[in-house]
Amino acid sequence: MPLLRAKDSGRTYDEAELGPRVAGSVADVVRKQAELGVDVVNDGEHSKASFTWYWRTRLAGFEPTSKTFGYRESTRDYTAFTDVYDDLKTMYAARKSNQGRITRDAVICSGPIRYTGQAQVQADIANLKRALSAVKAEEGFMTALAPTNVASPEQNEYYRTEEEFYAALADAMHEEYQAIVEAGFVVQIDDPRLATTYDRNPSWSIEDCRRDVARQVEILNHALRGLPRDRVRYHTCYGVNVAPRVHDMELKDFADLMLGIEAGGYSFEASNPRHEHEWQVWQEVKLPEDKVLIPGVVSHCITLVEHPELVAQRIERFAAVVGRERVLASNDCGFATAAAGDQVHPDVAWAKLAALTEGARLASERLWA
């Protein structure tokens, strides 16, 4: 972790030491997934200290700044549950201090944005290929951040307009997506901003949010241009947010727009207590015939390990609506915002994945009986 943190923070680190450590960690996480019976595996993002920050070593055009950017204290949920969020912030700050984390500077866009992470993404590809060669799995996928999640318009001090700024980000991230697909993997686009738009913008109405989501979809489709839809899976979520979450945007308010993304599958939260009921949305929103749903059937928001029978029931609900061939059971989201494991203990995460695979086995037995 100290090496990863230093790398993603732009500080000096021992490349000769970090490379083999990452390769070994990827091999370990892939082996554990396969041993549990997970069919579609990934590298656990073990080359990244944080899924939201890794891009900083892969994009040129940004430089550190003393300015601050953020939204947390103005979210709808924070306003409604200020004491809860303040307690959580205190707890996480203490945990980070105990782990000796490196503080990362904010950045601004001060020049032309271009992708410079070719060697890094190829190293990630090589690590996953090597790990997969030693296990039995149906498919491998790699994650990459959506362009609208990389930076906010407030950080743009180079491009004339917000549209030009996001177009440049989309063009740059396209290179990473394309490299993953050309290597034979599925690329998963991680895009928590889409589902969190409502909570992060307290003055916006649902219609305001829908207009912004539509714009986000347009930007992402520009980044995905030319890629086969069946090699792209899309993921949105509400973040690793173990909090009240009363003001999450509901799936019914953006599902139709999400389906406009040029992807073959859609991953979303479907098992935490705030969203489990939303399987019913797909009774009204028609899923195109050539696409699949990837609902979360175990949650990253609770420490309790789901019973396999509950997991099976969740899978069967979706299968009853869209068809048994078009449901790929997954987890709601990653089990932590960063490799240090902020939220879910690794032992709990593995137990949840074991429940996932056992629940999928039970559901398959009944669905194909």
Image (cartoon, rainbow, N blue to C red):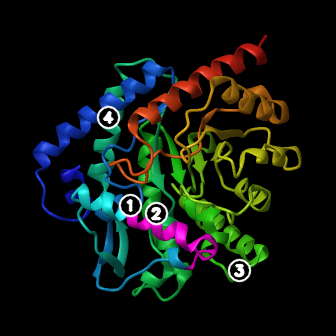
The Cα–Cα distance between marks 1 and 3, rounded to whole angstroms, is 29 Å
**As rendered, which of 335 and 150 lies closer to the eye?**
335
Instruction: Identify the mark nearer the N-term, 4 or 2.
Output: 4
Amino acid found under the numbered disc labelled 2: Leu
The Cα–Cα distance between marks 4 and 2, rounded to whole angstroms, is 30 Å
The residue beneath circle 1 is: 92
Is disc 1 in contact with disc 3, using a CB cutoff of under 8 Å? no
Amino acid found under the numbered disc labelled 4: Val
Q: For the residue labelled by badge 4, is the local secondary structure a helix, a strand or a loop?
A: helix
The residue beneath circle 4 is: 26
Amino acid found under the numbered disc labelled 1: Tyr
Amino acid found under the numbered disc labelled 3: Trp
The residue beneath circle 3 is: 204
Residue span colored magenta: 74-90
Is 86 colored magenta in this rendering?
Answer: yes
Q: For the residue labelled by badge 3, is the local secondary structure a helix, a strand or a loop?
A: loop
User: Residue 112 at x, y = what percent?
Assistant: 36, 77
Left or right, 304 with respect to 282, comes to left
Is disc 4 in contact with disc 1, using a CB cutoff of under 8 Å? no
Q: How many neighbours does mark 4 have within 10 angstroms: few (below 14), some (14-19), or many (20 or more)?
A: many
Q: How many neighbours does mark 3 have within 10 angstroms: few (below 14), some (14-19), or many (20 or more)?
A: some
Instruction: Identify the mark nearer the N-term, 4 or 1.
Output: 4
